[in-house]
Amino acid sequence: MNSGSVSIANKEFYKNHPEMVQNGKKIPIDATSLEHEEYRQEWKKHYESANNSNVEPVPTAKKTQTTPKPKKKPVSNKAVKGAVLPCEQCKLVNSTVQCSHGRKAIHNMLEVVPSETGDLISLNSKYRNACGKHPRWGVSGYTSSTYKSSSAKFNAMSWRVGKPTWLASIVPHEYTIKATSCSGGKTTIVRAYPSDKISVKIDGKAWRTAKDKVEYIIDNVLGQYLKEPKFQFLEGTLNLTVGREEYPKDNRAFYKYDASVGFNPLLGAKIRIPFGPTAALPNWMKEYGDFYLFAEFSGGVSINGHWAKVSPDKSDAYIDAKGSIEGKIGASLFLVNDSVLKVEASGGTGISIVAQADSEGDKPAIVADILWEGIKGEATIEVAWGIIEFKREFNIVDPQTLNKSPLKLDLSTVLSN
């Protein structure tokens, strides 16, 4: 640049724009700001006008000294120290990172779930005054590559965990993507999640064959020592599907799960243990009448519920679940009589768990309370071979909740184990 022309251009520019002088100091013209585009063009006009008039700054001299005629100097591209106009550097105007499904990065982040062939990520950029080194894209992290063009593509590779686990806790593979220029750049992170899908189904119908064998053992073995023992297992179904999915409305990939369960009961049992002197009577004598003391234990677990994560921000959950165990001590009298067949009195207590569904983030959970059933009494009289029944129940001690705060069970922990 011609130093004389630079001085004249500066003088003319700041004379026309006093707002660019604050506290006696000149504000430099920004070389890249769009707001200073008009300033840059005006300064160039002043410079070109001064340069074309062959003006060079006049050195200080005495009045009696004759000023020599200035000579025309060729324009030089060499930067002059102190010039207000900075060097015009290449600048990244904008850049976009987009997955193969058309989803774009938001706030410099894009989450994807690559298919078996991967997810082809598209890179596009726009430059102003691009130099010989730019445009340029750089990809690093799980894989590394460089692309010397404004548009490029790279494959975010698919992968699988390959073992049973709660997939929501898996750390994704990350790719760091940089679009660079001489005056700066932009960095975007792409997170690639595993494509594993897990489906589990438990059908109580498949239990029937095995249950027949178990009931035979119960009746013919345990039945010799217990009074009509009863067991129930897996009356219902359970379905579970889990895996990461891309959310089509923005840049996120969320952990989608859908679990439904309906077992009534999941497990149930009733065992009566007779004791006392008459408990040892042979079975043929008991056909005509029986009186015995007994200890009885019964309980079961039933559960009906549904958990679903339908979007990154929305969950759906409900549950109706109860588990209980009760114990009784009583006496039973059985007589072969047309008017009175059976008289039974007992007292006992029990503990039950009542649960509700709770969903937080990517993890379905159950919140439960433990209830003590108190102490109950019961008297039953059956007449006419059980066709008519008289029954009375009463509380000796009222029920109450045992836990001060609700208990929480994280189902993801159970499924991971």
Image (cartoon, grey):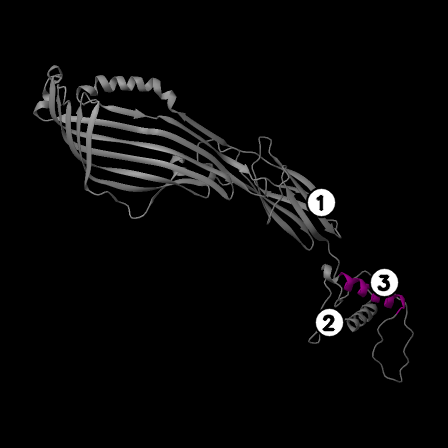
Task: State which tag comes first along the sequence, 3 or 2.
Answer: 2
Toward the viewer: 217 or 23? 217
Q: Residues within 10 Å of mark 2 (few under 14, many from 20)?
A: few
Kind of residue at disc 2: Glu
Magenta segment, prevailing SS (helix, strand or loop): helix
Quadrant containing the C terminus in the rendered view: top left
Most extreme residue toward the left is 277
How far is disc 1 from disc 3 in space, using C-alphas?
A: 34 Å
Give residue 208's mark.
Answer: none
Question: Could you tell me residue 364's position as x and y percent?
Answer: 42, 39
User: What numbered label is drawn on residue 75?
Assistant: 3
Q: Secondary structure at mark 3?
A: loop
Question: Is residue 314 on the magenta stretch?
Answer: no
- Height in image: 243 above or below 202? below
Mark 1 Cα within 10 Å, few/some/many (few <14, many 20+)?
Answer: some
| 310 left or right, relative to 86 | left
Separation (CA) of disc 2 from disc 1: 38 Å
Front tag of 1 and 3: 1
Residue pointed to by mark 1: 150
Nearest the viewer among 174 and 348 is: 348
Q: Amino acid at mark 1?
A: Ser
Tell me the magenta residue range. 37-54
Residue type at tag 3: Val
Closer to the eye: label 2 or 1: 2
Quarter assignment of residue 31: bottom right
Q: Position of residue 274 (x, y in %)?
A: 14, 25
Q: What residue did someone put label 2 on?
A: 19
In this image, 199 relative to 276: left or right?
right
- Is 416 or 103 nearer to us in this picture? 103
The residue located at (90%, 72%) in the rendering is: 70
Compared with residue 393, is residue 67 higher up or lower down, i.e. above or below? below
